[in-house]
Amino acid sequence: MKAILFCINPYSFGILKPLNDELIARGNEVLWYVPDRIADKFPFKNESIVTNSIKTLYDFKSDAIFVPGNEVPHYLSGVKVQVFHGLAGEKKGHFRIRNYFDLYLTQGPYFTSRFEDLAKKHKDFKVKETGWCKLDTLFGSKNSFNNEREEILKNSNKKRIVLYAPTFSPSLTCAKHAKDKIFEIADTEDVFVIIKFHDLMDKAIAEEYIALAANRPNVTVSEERNILKFLIISDIMISDTSSVVYEFTLLDKPVVTVNSKSQNICWRDIKDVKHLRKALIEELEQDNFRENRKLIIEQYHPYSDGKSSARMIEAVEDYIRNFGVPEKRKLNIYRKYLMNKMFGKEPK
């Protein structure tokens, strides 16, 4: 099988890497698409075949295109596969059908049931529950960072690691209002604080945190692209309505959110940031939502075997056996116009 890994945002790299590795291990031909504007952030240049050219993708004549985003040129050959870029189903647009995809590979029953209902309505795509490729690394690396964790705690002389990972969405983020409390926690509690911002976080807000962290040896603002290591080594997470909350919850560890808009809150959520420090201490000591997390794990991602990439590939192979490889995706004039505007017209 000839596969394209289609990236238009840097967060896609970590999502697709486990899928890339599984595709290659199975003898498939893989081509990454990374546009120039994010090319300097692509971390796998030395081990991957990568292009910034839509014409190259067109000539590649792929069998499948894996997309952790919302758009893909309709005129490219291959099964257009929606991989998703997060687990927050309540975020605007998560269940919006944009007509670009032939196959939706869902992470768990909560997502599968919704997309199966939409498939019955639209009648032009299929749905298969496989788990999410990004989490193969999470479940396969649970013991890989023990030494790094111990080194952080030893060097900082702290007892626990707190991960602070707010979303970037202006209407959902707690980054602006929680800043003082985050640094109060760092200054008063026996913790090392890792701050991990989304690639699209407001730069002015990020710079305020960087400046405040500079004089605190137990606070770091990480620029690493992949958050998985921090999920694994941290004891507790502080966030808001970020999809990464679900990823952390899948590791069966406590979370505190600020004014979360999530539909299925199975963790500690506070409505006023002034209660953040108290809530953090209570969850570190008592873990009051341990039983509640089981619901999220069962509904959002029940697969902990690290083999979701394999299931995704097999789902695409099964689609091709049943329906063949589409040369292009049928779209209405408006959708074609949007794709032509975003990626250029179909190459000749």
Image (spheres, rainbow, N blue to C red):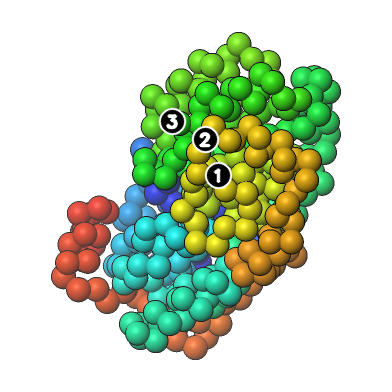
Which amino acid type corresponds to the residue marked 2 in the rendered image?
Answer: Val
Q: Which residue is mark 3?
A: 176
For the image, the number of numbered tags is: 3
| Quadrant where the image shows the C terminus | bottom left
Q: Any mark on residue 216, and which?
A: none
CA distance for labels 3 and 1: 16 Å
As drawn, 78 above or below 125? above
Q: Any mark on residue 270, and which?
A: 1
Q: Residue at x 43, y 82 (%)?
A: 117
Which amino acid type corresponds to the residue marked 3 in the rendered image?
Answer: Lys
Q: Residue at x 58, y 35 (%)?
A: 275
Q: Position of residue 164 (x, y in %)?
A: 59, 35
As drawn, 6 above or below 119? above
| Quadrant where the image shows the N terminus | bottom right
In the foreground, 123 or 280: 280
CB under 8 Å between discs 3 and 2: no
